[in-house]
Amino acid sequence: MKTLGYYDGAYGPLDEMTIPMSDRVCWFGDGVYDAGPCRNYHVFAMDEHVDRFYRSASFLDIRIPMEKAEWKELLNELVHKMDDGNLFVYYQVTRGVGADKKRSHVYEAGVPGKLWVTLTPATVDDGIKPISLVTTEDTRFLHCNIKTLNLIPSVMASQKAKDAGCQEAVFYRPGEIVTECAHSNIHILKNGELWTHPADHLILGGIARLHLIRACEALHIPVHQECFSLKELFEADEVIVTSSSNLCRHANVIDQKPVGGKSPELLETIRAYLLDEFKQATEA
């Protein structure tokens, strides 16, 4: 199978799958998701992603109808139905369908949610080629730590980046404090040290972000989980962008202005460490 979709126990090729219109995701985006890369049929950092998935669901009082062990077993089973083991593994749980199947903002507590999976061919970017970024004001709500399906601000920011010929958009809050990107975390290197926004309610605590912090600690690079400004972003020695799909990329242009390029050796040490960790964890 080249692509796979799963919904509430049924699965098949992605373009053949259907969902009921009464699923609350259609009306309210009422659900949470998680995702990550798979190589050689090994889902990378599965425990960390699944833990975050269940944590996000608990924040929204959504009941996942499987225990973690059963869910991980199902993901592995679905992955092995694919023709190729290099994949992007996406999954979500929605609050599902109410008993009366009517549109209502209130929900029935305790009703099991509906589980979804999509599997598509993908490989992890090696991070060697630099990317361009564009900045945009962060107008999202104050639950960014929950990986919800309510992503309209990120959609619009991503489109702004595409229209500008860039690969990602950088969010900033009042005071020009950098938070994260539309679908990535962002960090800077300055004077041999890593700076990254604290994992509070203004950002999603990325799994790749966590692996970056651990890599820096292993490499004896000081880490500051503290806010930094747009000015500091533009003046940084290097700008690093991380996500589960792209474990360690770096930017050389923001808002059409050159950035970074002042600490290439340290950047390469970090990039190589993270890619090697990924490859070792997903060997055939």
Image (tube, helix red, strand yellow):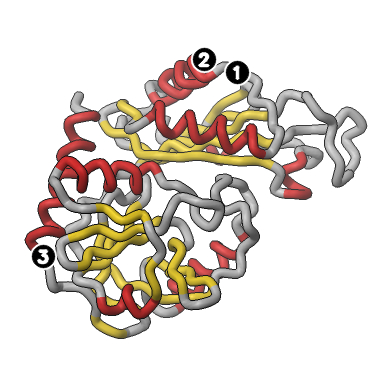
Q: Which mark is residue 264?
A: 3
**Which x, y percent locates residue 21?**
78, 41
Q: Which residue is mark 1?
A: 66
Q: Are marks 2 and 1 in contact (CB under 8 Å)?
A: yes
Q: Which mark is residue 284?
A: none
Q: Which mark is residue 70?
A: 2
User: Mark 2 or mark 3: which comes first in sequence?
Assistant: 2
Residue for point 90% across, 40% down: 102
How many numbered marks appear? 3
Residue type of the residue flagged with mark 3: Pro
Q: Which element carries disc 1, helix, strand or loop?
A: loop
**Which x, y percent locates residue 117?**
53, 33
Residue type of the residue flagged with mark 2: Glu
Mark 2 crowdedness (10 Å alpha carbons): few <14, some 14-19, many ≥20:
few
Q: Nearer the viewer, mark 2 or mark 3?
A: 3
Q: Which element carries disc 3, helix, strand or loop?
A: helix
Mark 1 crowdedness (10 Å alpha carbons): few <14, some 14-19, many ≥20:
few
Q: On the rendered structure, is 206 left or right of 217? A: right
**Which x, y percent locates residue 226?**
38, 59
Q: CA distance from mark 2 to mark 3?
A: 43 Å
270 shown above or below 43: below
Mark 3 crowdedness (10 Å alpha carbons): few <14, some 14-19, many ≥20:
few
Q: Nearer the viewer, mark 3 or mark 1?
A: 3
Q: Residue furthest bottom?
A: 257
Q: CA distance from mark 3 to mark 1?
A: 45 Å
Q: Which element carries disc 2, helix, strand or loop?
A: helix
Q: Are marks 2 and 3 in contact (CB under 8 Å)?
A: no
Along the line of sight, the residue nearer the viewer: 19 or 45: 45
> In the picture, which quadrant includes the C terminus?
top left
Q: CA distance from mark 2 to mark 1?
A: 6 Å
Query: Would you identify the image quadrant in which residue 257 lies?
Result: bottom left
29 shown above or below 159: above
